[in-house]
Amino acid sequence: MQNTHLIPIPSLCTHYQVEMSFFTGLNEYGLIEFISVEKTYCIHQDKIADVEKMIRLHQDLQLNYEGIDAVFNLLEKIDDLKSELITAQNKLKRFEDG
Amino acid sequence: MAFIDYYKILGVDKSATKSDIKKAYRKLARKHHPDLNPNDKEAELQFKKVNEANEVLSNDENRKKYDKYGENWQHGEAYDQAQKQQDQQQHYQRSSRPQDFGDGEYSDFFESMFGGGFGNRSGNTKFRGQDFNAQLQLNLKDVYTTEKRVLTVNGKNIRLTVPAGITNGQIIKIKGKGGEGRNGGPNGDLLIEFNISNNTDFKRDGSNLYKTVNLDVYKSVLGGDVILDTFDGKVKLTIKPLTQNGTQVKLKGKGFPIYKKEGQFGDLVITYNIELPKKLSDKEKELFEELAKLQ
């Protein structure tokens, strides 16, 4: 993994105006994964969209870590079900109109 | 610009306590939050309305002002003062927007009564821009090969490579081509959903193609050749003598390209459908009767 794709947690704290403890909590609950680079905790840039969603859920809806985890799991299930539905609809087309 | 009944939006009456308002807001915010309702424009709009109602009714000073002027807000002193300060052209541009709730965070009604946003839920936090959703309609033949296309989304031309074998309903994400970030945050993504219509005789299931080939009774009994048009040219099918109705043959690698696996293809499955003659000449009938006697 290239270090250029890693974002230091302190930078995220400044950027999003969120306490370090929030990110530590997300890491402890397994919602994000800290990567240690020269004694600084970082996350991969691909996880930024998820992190932003977690911040919004926490700030807008006062969700705690368990709540955020539950929402992410359910959204993942919805995505899986949507994919299954599309696959099933595409399969069904084989049998439509003879 | 219409009056907005914030009490109605939150589903509380005018005598609601701060606690009632907070409770109603939280319930509706959980219901309509855009992160819990991905790609749902209606939920996003409702969330904005609920947020705005809460910002007015949960703040004592603003609730008082809102209650005082109510539906007569246009004649209220706050409105008059705001009007004087407003640039005429800016006002014209605002009121010419088609909806009370546009793309902004607040309605025109809110901005006219209270000025810009206050106690904004996001403050000055930098947030990634909104993801944009677009749909691209293609024919099955278009996605048999990898093609480059140029899409125009919100006036911007976006070059896109559509990989061969993409499936109906599949979504491709183009990073950074969505809405602009808030307060200097990064841009959102562009999500393109592919709607693939099939106007061919082939049925598709993943990378496999299916086709029914009609055979006359003579070819099914005696055998022979049939030439079949496929996506990459003609294929000669050798029909074995005494081929039964519903017989399936699989042509390996003659199906559809496998998504993002260059040079790999699925199979083409042929089902034979034996067609009996609908009319017989006297001579044919006679010959069939002779055949029947042999059984």
Image (spheres, helix red, strand yellow):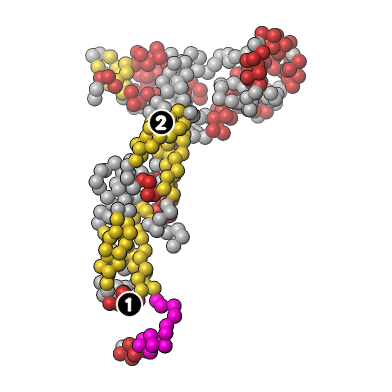
x, y percentage for residue B231? 33, 53
| Nearer the observer, B174 or B48 | B174
Say how many tags the image has.
Answer: 2
Residue found 49% across the figure and 34% down from its top? B39
Amino acid at the residue labelled 2: Ile
Reply above or below: B62 against B237: above
Other residues around mark 2 within 10 Å, as few (<14) / some (14–19) / many (≥20): few
Residue found 46% across the figure and 36% down from its top? B134
Residue B191 bears which disc, if any? none
x, y percentage for residue B208? 32, 53
Please state if B204 lies on the left or on the right of B155 as rendered: left
Residue found 42% across the figure and 52% down from its top? B198
Q: Quadrant of the N terminus of chain B?
A: top right
x, y percentage for residue A32? 34, 25
Q: Is residue B73 magenta?
A: no
The residue labelled by disc 1 is B218
Regarding residue B253, the answer to whether it shows in the image is yes
Q: Are marks 2 and 1 on the same chain?
A: yes
Sequence-first tag of 2 and 1: 2
Magenta span covers which residues?
B276-288
| Nearer the observer, A3 or B67 | A3
Residue B158 bears which disc, if any? 2
x, y percentage for residue A65? 41, 25
Q: Quadrant of residue B12?
A: top right
Tell me how far mark 2 sits from mark 1, CA to CA.
55 Å
